[in-house]
Amino acid sequence: MNIFFVISGFLITTLCLKEKYSTGDISLKSFYIRRILRIFPVAYLYVLVVFILNYVFHLQIAWFQFIGAMFYIMNLNYFRATQFSWFFGHYWSLANEEQFYLVFPYVLKKNSTVFTWVNLFIVFILPLLCLLQYFIPVLNQGVLYGFTHYIIKFQAISIGCLFSIFTFKKKFDKQWLRKYKVIGNLVGLFLIFYLNYDPFYTTKAVFINLLISAITGYIIISNIIPSRDVIFRFFNFKIMSFIGVLSYSIYIWQQIFTSKEPNLPWFLVTFPYNVPFIIVVPLLSYYLYEKHFLKLKGRFTKLKGKNATENLVV
């Protein structure tokens, strides 16, 4: 999950910076319209489908889970502490992203320096504050508890934002990145899969997720420059680009087919019979439904040229 958060923060910040430096401003209206056209159509279609499945197959999904998914508030502790629904578990990440982008593009538009410092606070100071709360329990309650437990959820997105800012300002040594790229990427990928990402709030998770996010950011910036090495070629295979295009659709729909819900038809949720559904349903969703909305996105951008990475989960 951290990987997609970092990619999202990096890509969206880069697009906003390009717009600001090329046009002198960031159109928040166009930004939010693009977000709505990318995220909302399939997200609400999924909620509708789950609502129908809940009625037909008696899945017993609580009504407030639908409310949480529809209003992008599934990342609030209330939804974790009460009846948890697997079907809307991934809307936790969507809530994180939409809440982040509800405010931070405005900050970037008004003052890029403040935007940078806010993200630096989230990435470097907030984890230390969380550690302090762990050792001093009296600090881990009330308003301060709510603040740290909420803001820390944006950690990975903020790291993506910072990598974008520093790349834009040419703060990274390109020669160093090229020299150690292959070994650095291989070690980084190993660590990402070796370390266990934890979406729940613990002091250990804060620092593990921070490391995973930083490694992801490094892998991103080290592969921005075209090269002939095996890492760059792997990430730029046509099949990888195609998966990137479908990543959001796959992410949304797979939750049904990996649910292990006993009330659903067995072939929908049992491996390997569920695999074709995980592949075919996102394909149908993207080409028959989502593309109609994605075509409208181009009307609300001042940046010309097609960027395939815009079709990632951003």
Image: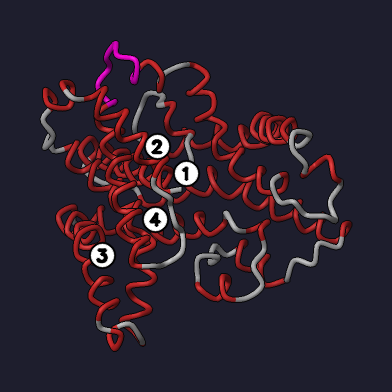
Residue drawn where x is 32% and y is 82% of the image: 140
Secondary structure of residue under mark 3: helix
- Marking on residue 204: none
Dot 4 or dot 1: first in sequence order is 1
How many residues crowd mark 4 within 10 Å: few (<14), some (14–19), many (20+)?
A: some
Which residue carries the number 4 mark?
Answer: 101
Inter-mark Cα distance, 2 to 3: 36 Å
Secondary structure of residue under mark 1: helix
In magenta stretch: residue 207: no
The answer to whether residue 95 is left or right of residue 52 is left
Dot 3 or dot 4: first in sequence order is 4
Amino acid beneath label 1:
Arg
Secondary structure of residue under mark 4: helix
- Marking on residue 301: 2
Residue 301: give x, y in percent of width and height: 40, 37
How many residues crowd mark 1 within 10 Å: few (<14), some (14–19), many (20+)?
A: many
Residue 75: give x, y in percent of width and height: 50, 65
Read off the magenta span: 223-232
Inter-mark Cα distance, 3 to 1: 32 Å
Amino acid beneath label 2:
Thr
Dot 2 or dot 4: first in sequence order is 4
Which residue carries the number 3 mark?
Answer: 127
Quarter of the image for the C terminus: give it.
Answer: top left
